[in-house]
Image: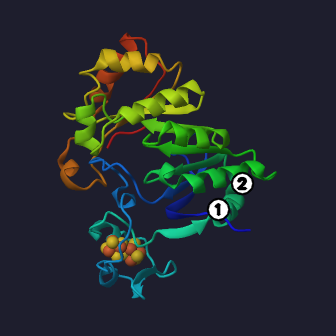
Amino acid sequence: MNSRCALVSKIIPFSCVDGPGSRLALFLQGCNLRCKNCHNPWTIGCCNYCGECVPRCPHQALSLTAGKVIWDASACQQCDACLHLCPQQATPMAQILSVADVISQVRKAALFIEGITVSGGEATLQLPFLRELFSAIKADPQLQHLTCLVDSNGMLSETGWRKLLPVCDGAMLDLKAWSSERHIMLTGRDNTLIKNSIRLLAEHGKLVELRLLTIPDHSDYVEHIDSLAGFILALGRVPVRLNAFHAHGVYGEAKGWRSATPADIASLADALSARGVDNLIYPALYL
Ligand code: SF4
Ligand code: SF4
C-alpha cells in the first residue's frame, strides 16, 4: 500500500507531557512561526544540506553523500551538538517516514498508551499526512481505541481544520500573546488566525486545552485581562493550562529572559479567576 510521508523530527514512544495520559508523541519538522521562546528550536527549519554539521559530529554519525546529509542512527550518541550549530534551526536527524512506518511504531506502543499526539514544529503543515495517519488509526481494529490529538500553533485555516476534525479527537493550542503587536514581537506573525482556530475548535468541542505562557516582562495577558478573560469565557468550559517560561534550551535573545516564578503565575491566575475563568491547570514545575 502506498502511504503518505512526512518529515519527522523525532518520535517519543511514551510521553506523559504531550496531552492526557501516556501517549506516543510524533514531532514533525518545520514550523510557520518563529517563536523567540521556542523550546524545540531545531524543529523550526528544514535542512538545506549545507554540510556544516557533518565534520562537527563527535561520533562520526553524519556523512555527506550525493549532496545529502546521511544520519547513522546506530552511531549517534544523541549529544545534540549538530542541533546547536545548525544555521537553519534544523536537524540532520529528521527522517522521512510513511504513515505505514509510523503505524508500525504505534502498534509496538499500543498496549501502553492512551493515544498519540502529533506535535512539531507545526504538525498541521503536513496536513495530508496527518489526516491519513489519524484515518489509518481509526480504521484499525487494534488501534482505534487510541485518541488522536494534535499539538498545534493554530496557524491553520478554517478549511484546513474542517478537513482534519473528522479524524482528529482534539487539539491543544497556545495563545502566545493577546495583542497582535506583542504576538508579532514574540513569534513573527499576527494572532488573528490563531484566535479563530481556538474559537472554531471550542465550537466543535475539540479544544482539549488552551495554553497561556507567562514570560515575565514580555507577556501581555494581564495588561489585556478583561478582553482575554471574555475571550476564554466565550469558549465554554475549556481547561486553561498556565505555563511558566524558562530559558533552558532556547536560542537567541530569549536566553537572557527571566524565568517565570510562582508569583508571576499567581498574578495571572488570580486575575483570570476574579473574572470567572477558574478551570486552570498550574505548572507542574518551575526552573
Ligand atoms: S542540519 Fe543544518 S547544519 Fe546540518 S546540513 Fe542541514 S542545514 Fe546544514
Ligand atoms: S546528536 Fe548529532 S552531533 Fe551528536 S552524535 Fe548524533 S548526529 Fe552526531
Residue at mark 1: 99
Place of residue 252 in the rendered image (x, y in percent of width and height, measured from the top left): 21, 55
Q: Which residue is drawn at 51% across and 63% down?
A: 8
- Picture quarter with the N terminus: bottom right
Residue 173 lies, with reference to residue 263, above or below; the image says below
In the visual, does 142 lie left or right of 174?
Answer: right
Which residue is more in the foreground, 272 or 203?
203
Place of residue 185 in the rendered image (x, y in percent of width and height, measured from the top left): 22, 40
Q: Is residue 10 visible?
A: yes
Indicate the secondary structure of the residue bearing disc 1. Answer: helix
Q: Name the N-terminal-most of marks 1 and 2.
A: 1
Q: Which residue is drawn at 45% across and 60% down?
A: 29
Q: Can residue 21 be seen in this view?
A: no
- Picture quarter with the C terminus: top left
Dot 2 crowding, Cα within 10 Å, few <14, some 14–19, many 20+: some
Q: Name the kind of residue labelled 1 in the image.
A: Val
